[in-house]
Every structure is written in structure tokens, then in C-alpha cells.
């Protein structure tokens, strides 16, 4: 079961991982390939049990680690799952209003 989706921007090495965040109830995008202005995150290459580092932070909204397919939310998230660790949801299709390349 995949818990993240991977996209590559056309004609670039800009790979990104996507997952549905149960805290924000929306999609998050994590840049993992080369060429991203915001830098890149380390990824273990797994779509089923992904680990990324360092943490990803949407200031004052959502701040988390992903380790072995679990999301470890830091205590400074604005949502109800702040400070909790949860299993990632199965990655299915893009949600309504969301398309490849959107932030
Ligand atoms: Zn979130």
C-alpha cells in the first residue's frame, strides 16, 4: 500500500512527494528531487514506508516528521493532531481541486 504519491515536473528533476495530511485535511507536497528553489528533503525512496528528513514546516500551520510511514506531528501545529504520531493514509487519487504541480 502506497501512502505517498510521487510527481516529477515536466522536463525537470523536480521530484516531489504528496500525501494527504489528516491534521490539515489537505495535501502536502515535499520536494525531494534536485532543482527546487526551496531545497530538497532526504527521502528513503519508499512509497510504502517513507522516511523524510529533516522535518517539514508550514509555519503556524503544520510541522511534522515522516518516519517509516508514520507522521510525527510536532507540538507547534495549529490542528488537533498536534504532538501526535499517526499512520499515514493510503494514497489514492488526487482530491478534488488538486492537480499535479499545485502547491
Ligand atoms: Zn498538515
Image (cartoon, rainbow, N blue to C red):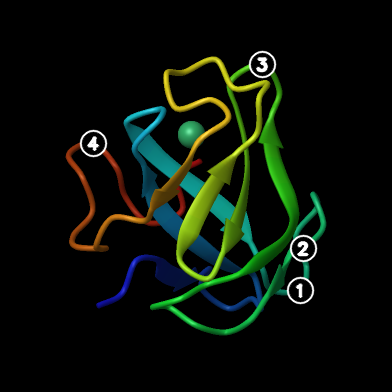
Q: Specify the quadrant of the image occupied by residue 57.
A: top right
| Residue occupied by mark 4 | 97
Query: How far apart are labels 2 and 3 at the CA level?
Result: 21 Å
Q: Quadrant of the N terminus?
A: bottom left
Closer to the eye: label 4 or 2: 2
Q: Are marks 3 and 1 in contact (CB under 8 Å)?
A: no
Q: Are marks 2 and 3 in contact (CB under 8 Å)?
A: no
Closer to the eye: label 2 or 1: 2
User: Residue at 32% across / 30% down in the picture?
Assistant: 25
Q: Are marks 2 and 1 in contact (CB under 8 Å)?
A: yes
Q: Is label 1's Cβ within 8 Å of ligand 1?
A: no
| Residue occupied by mark 2 | 40
Q: Position of residue 17 (x, y in %)?
A: 51, 64
Q: Position of residue 72 (x, y in %)?
A: 57, 46
Q: Is label 3's Cβ within 8 Å of ligand 1?
A: no
Query: How far apart are labels 4 and 2 at the CA level?
Result: 25 Å
Amino acid at each position: 500500500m502506497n501512502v505517498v504519491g510521487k510527481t516529477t515536473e515536466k522536463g525537470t528533476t523536480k521530484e516531489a512527494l504528496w500525501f494527504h495530511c489528516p491534521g490539515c485535511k489537505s495535501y502536502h507536497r515535499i520536494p525531494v528531487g534536485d532543482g527546487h528553489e526551496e531545497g530538497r528533503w532526504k527521502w528513503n525512496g519508499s512509497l510504502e514506508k517513507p522516511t523524510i528528513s529533516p522535518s517539514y514546516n508550514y509555519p503556524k500551520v503544520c510541522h511534522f516528521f515522516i518516519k517509516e510511514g508514520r507522521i510525527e506531528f510536532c507540538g507547534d501545529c495549529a490542528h488537533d493532531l498536534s504532538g501526535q504520531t499517526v499512520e499515514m493514509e493510503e494514497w489514492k487519487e488526487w482530491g478534488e481541486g488538486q492537480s499535479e504541480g499545485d502547491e
